[in-house]
Amino acid sequence: MDLPFNFTFGNQFKLLKNLSRLDISGITGHCDVRRISRNFFENTPFLKEIDISNCKISHFDKGPFKFLRQLRKLDISHNKELGFAFLPNVTYGLNGTNITTFHADSIHCQIGKGTLLTLSHIQYLFQTKLTEASFANNRIELIEKGVLPNMPTTLEKLSFAANRLTTGIYLFEFHTLYNLREYNMTLFLHQENFASFSEKCDEKSDSFTTNLSIKHEDIRSKRFEVKNRINITIYLPKNLETIFANSSKLYGRFPKFNLNASGIKNVYLQDNFLFAWNQPVFGVESVEKLDLSNNLCTDISPLFTASLLRVKYLNLARNMLGRALRSDNKCQIFQNQRNIEELDISGNQLVDLPFCTFQNLVKMRILRLGNNQMTNVSFGIRHMINLSYVDFSDNRLTSLSDETMTSLKLIFKKSKVLINLSYNKLQCTCQNLAFLAWMNEHKNHFVHIEQYICSNRNTQFEFREMEKSLLILHMNCINFDILNVTATAFITLFLCLALVLIIRKYIWHIRYFIYKTKQKHNFEIRLSGMDPEPLLMNKNLPNLNIQDLSEDSMNTLCDRKQSANQYFYDAFISYVGADRDFVFQKVKPLLESHNINVCIRDIHFELGNGKIENIMKAIGRSRRTICIVSKAYMRSRWRTYELNMAKMEGIKARDSLGFVHLVLMPDLFHGVCNTNIKDLIDRKYYLDYPPDGSALQEEFWKKLIDIIKSPYL
């Protein structure tokens, strides 16, 4: 019902003995009460539930609810001008009611300094029988010592969500809430409404709130990290089952600690910044559901998962665990998770996994591996006889291996497992004919198979009509007449193609040889003409003229391998024009600040010389070549030339491919791995450039500087 200004409940309301629920909320209607007097509810003694949220209330007299002996639920949320100053007046007398649920969310203005929840604010709640209490979205930064021990012992659900909580002594008082089953400290990262900055809001404050800055000695940062030598034990209520700490700005490495909470089952830590999980966590043996998705994590260790013995649902999606899982050759990360029924590691930049990765997950029902970069299913699944759903969507799969098809066929006989292969790169070719026939045989097990498409643009193959399409493809693949007629031409073509491929394979060797031969020839001409031009550009040695060299030393100067201090530049930076700002604003200033002399083409290439001449001089005069590789870089013909000639310089002149090092930009991660950089990536001559603002930035620059200054490997 709507409630106008200065409304009162008359004596006639005493006759409404069946009036047990009163909803005068401004959210569902119109409410403009402003003030709740002591006798406001005197004529409605039979109420059990009251919702006076968003009623523009700015004042409560002391004890307006003490007449309501049957009251069970009270909601005063969204009355933003109340503040905690009026909580004592609101809660006075509630110990004489049957109240079990109390909500005081958003009773502070949206904009303002942090608030302090004190013992005086909740002193009248102690003797009530509350089972659920919520103080969400009140700008709380700190909870005074003693508040939690003086909460009702019957409390089962407690929410401090959407506040600004910092760490303090109150964290060590949670164990006093003996019957607490659910705790919510989520910080919802929603966008602020710009109208809130200008709206009129005059909340009531008390001395505790206004003097919060005095108590800042109790406040610590929310960096979730401690020294390894410190053993921390966190005591939680023995009946606590669920913790909501998602979107709470928890940041850092997951620390080593002991958790004293024998009843904990559900832990939600998603949407934080816990970027390394490599420390043991003890006391989590009872956890059944753990959500760590979207934490930008790059490292996970078997130490972290060792105690997660009963976990049934594990969500690790939207992290960066591809490299860590790929390097787990002994398959120890998931070795103790024998009870897992649902595992989500989608969106983790997975390329492939060791065969034994999931060898102990015999109870697996749902496996989500979507939105990765897998080109084949390399892990074993034959033992997962309880599978009901496998998500391989949005990867780079062209088909499934014979081992995988055999394993799935055995599982098909025991369960109605569904497989999602949508948004992959399925090849509808003769080479894939066996795989396509196998899909048709078991098409009832594939989700939305009629929507699959061929990546090779085979317009004749339609997954909606697989049997017809397979017949057409089969006929095309066995056309022996055409094969016999074209046999002679094919042999000739094969020989020509082989020659072309050989030339193409060694094209950069040939180009490098041609350039060096030309350079040596020009050297001989200059030597015979006694050109006084300096030959060796060197920052540590005097320049040498042609006159200073004998003919015997010509080959030595042209072909010699220079030592570490005989190069004019420490590094030649190869980059595409689209990345010019990145090089000039970040790479060049940072490297030069560490006394690293860099060669930049837009600065150091000599006017009048050809591009090839400038590129080869820059490579030859530098100790290393650093390539800033992005999608635009891989499309550039000249940058490809720089990259490959630098590789040839490393192989032929420096005895190490480590002469070249790649910096892989973020936009390259979802692209196709180019053959020009595959050998460097296979030998780990690369660094991933982390996203701007990432905590990994400092570590990246340190590694790059160490690489430039270190000898070749």
Image: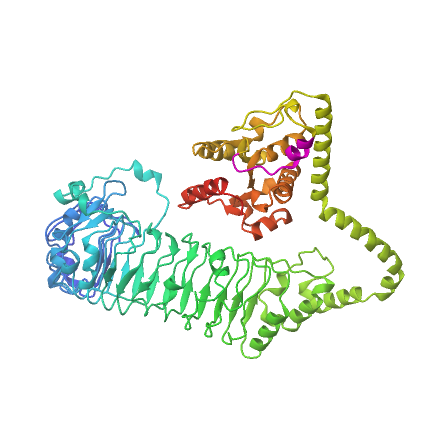
The image shows residue 129, relative to residue 1, as above or below, that is below
Locate residue 468: give its quadrant. Answer: bottom right
Name the foreground residue: 694 vs 9. Answer: 694
Indicate the position of residue 597 as horizontal and vertical percent values. Answer: 50, 31
Q: Hey, which residue is sitting farthest bottom in the picture?
A: 414
Residue closest to the eye, 610 or 659:
659
In percent of the image, x 75 and y 50: which residue is there?
Answer: 501
Image coordinates of residue 163 in percent, x first then y, are: 27, 49
What residue sits 44% from the left and 54% below the top? 298
The quarter of the picture where residue 305 lies is bottom left
Q: Quadrant of the N terminus?
A: bottom left
- Magenta-drawn segment: 552-565
- Queried whether the magenta region covers residue 564, the answer comes back as yes
The residue at 46%/40% (across/down) is 705
- Could you tell me residue 493's position as x and y percent? 84, 53
Q: How is the image coloured?
A: rainbow
Q: Quadrant of residue 648?
A: top right
Q: Is residue 612 visible?
A: no
Residue 555: x %, y % from top left: 68, 34
Q: Is residue 561 left or right of residue 508?
A: left
Does the segment drawn in magenta span residue 167? no
Is residue 35 left or right of 468 when viewed as pictured?
Answer: left
Compare residues 186 and 542 and report the one nearer the observer.
542
